[in-house]
Structure formats: structure tokens, C-alpha cells
């Protein structure tokens, strides 16, 4: 059973939510050729639907600025939110802010005329001109995921002390000390002398 939430601005945007997955769907057929703005929020259910173990939970505010033309449509996605992720150093969960802006060009063709001429800097989606709606769920999700930093660790407090789990930091520092006095270092030195 799907629940439907309608946001009424200039034109309705439908957000379909189900137990399995959420969908952010823009109407194509009834969307007038002009600028539109859609604001919505996604919560933990949105992120859990993708079953990504790197994102424990999250929430984000999303704006879609849509400008429709006769044969294409530009969608500017702007988002900001908080994601709960696992720290790469101490493995404890912490909240990390994410924000970003992406431009998606939606072309009303089934395939590109010259694929080699397509810009790699631009996000392009091809849809059939007969389609009544466009599903942006995966695009929004991937855009938010790509805003995460490559290295995700707790920051430092105002005194410059790490906010990571102190017990795990002790273990890490002990293991680094053990590596320095490892008996295998002697073997490395012997190999260099020969």
C-alpha cells in the first residue's frame, strides 16, 4: 500500500512512499513550460530504503528548481542535511553535515544523437517524450551520497582533542607502537644489508 503526499506550489509534485522504497517523481506531461520550484524533506526512511551500510540514518531538505522547455528540462537540485555515518577511525556513529547543488539536464529523447559529444561535466538523463513522469529518487540519493567526504572521522573539540572514542584511540596508538617495535623490522633491516 503506497501513501502519496502532494506538495502544492505552482504544480503538484508527488512523493510516493512505500515500505520498500521511496520515490521522488516529477510530472512531465502536465508541467508547463516555465520555471517551477519544489521543496521537500527526506527522512531516515528514504535512506534506509537503499540499504547502504555506510549511511545509518539521515535527513535532508531538498529544493528542485525546474525549468521546462520544449525538448529538454533543467533541474537544479539543492540539498542540505545531516547524515549519521560510522567514523573511519574509531568506528562509532556520528553526524556529519552534507550540502550541495547539482544541475541535471533532462532530454526528451530515447538516446543521444552523438554520445561522444556529450559533456562529462554535465549530468544528463534521457527520457521518452511520451513519459508522464520522471523518477528522480536515485539521482537525489546519489547526489547526497557524493557530498560525503572520502574520509569520515570525528572532528576535534575546542581544545584540539579528538572526539573519537578514547578507548579505541588507545588501542590504535598501542597498535602503532607495536608496529614500530615489531620483530619483523629486524628482518627488513637484514634484507637491506644483503
Image: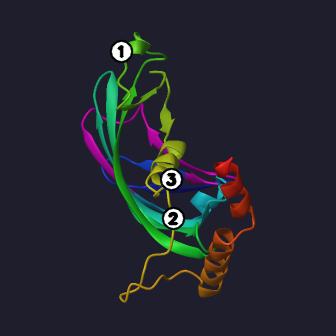
Question: Which residues make up the magenta segment?
Answer: 16-39
* Coordinates of residue 174 in the picture (x, y in percent): 66, 79
Q: Is residue 172 magenta?
A: no
Q: CA distance from mark 1 to mark 2?
A: 36 Å
Q: Is residue 154 left or right of residue 103?
A: right
**Label whose residue precedes the other's in the sequence (2 or 3):** 3
Q: Can residue 80 be seen by looking at this rendering?
A: yes
Tell me what residue is drawn at x 27 percent, y 32 percent: 33
Mark 2 surroundings within 10 Å by alpha-carbon count, few (fewer than 14), some (14 through 19), many (20 or more): some
Q: Which residue is label 1 attached to? A: 117
Q: Residue at x 71, y 62 (%)?
A: 186
Q: Position of residue 134 (x, y in %)?
A: 48, 36
Q: Secondary structure at mark 1?
A: helix
Q: Secondary structure at mark 2?
A: loop
**x and y percentages locating residue 69 in the rendered image:** 28, 28
Q: Nearer the viewer, residue 141 or 41?
A: 141
| Residue 145: numbered disc | 3
**For the residues bearing labels 3 and 1, Cβ distance under 8 angstroms:** no
Sort mark 3 into few (<14), some (14-19) or many (20+) by Cα contacts within 10 Å.
some
Name the residue beneath numbered marker 2. Answer: 152
Amino acid at each position: 500500500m503506497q501513501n502519496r503526499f502532494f506538495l502544492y506550489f505552482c504544480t503538484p509534485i508527488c512523493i510516493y512512499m512505500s515500505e520498500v522504497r521511496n520515490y521522488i517523481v516529477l510530472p512531465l506531461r502536465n508541467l508547463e513550460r516555465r520555471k517551477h520550484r519544489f521543496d521537500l524533506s527526506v527522512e531516515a526512511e528514504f535512506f534506509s530504503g537503499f540499504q547502504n551500510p555506510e549511511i545509518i540514518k539521515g535527513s535532508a531538505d531538498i529544493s528542485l528548481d525546474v525549468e521546462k522547455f520544449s525538448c529538454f528540462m533543467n533541474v537544479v537540485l539543492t540539498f542540505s542535511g545531516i547524515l549519521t555515518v560510522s567514523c573511519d577511525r574509531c568506528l562509532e556513529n556520528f553526524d556529519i553535515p552534507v550540502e550541495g547543488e547539482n544541475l541535471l539536464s533532462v532530454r526528451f529523447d530515447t538516446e543521444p544523437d552523438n554520445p561522444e559529444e556529450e559533456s562529462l561535466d554535465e549530468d544528463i538523463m534521457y527520457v521518452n517524450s511520451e513519459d508522464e513522469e520522471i523518477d528522480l529518487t536515485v539521482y537525489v540519493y546519489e547526489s547526497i551520497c557524493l557530498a560525503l567526504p572520502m574520509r569520515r572521522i570525528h572532528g576535534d573539540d575546542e581544545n584540539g582533542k579528538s572526539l573519537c572514542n578514547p578507548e579505541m584511540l588507545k588501542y590504535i596508538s598501542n597498535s602503532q607502537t607495536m608496529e614500530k617495535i615489531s620483530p619483523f623490522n629486524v628482518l627488513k633491516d637484514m634484507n637491506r644489508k644483503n
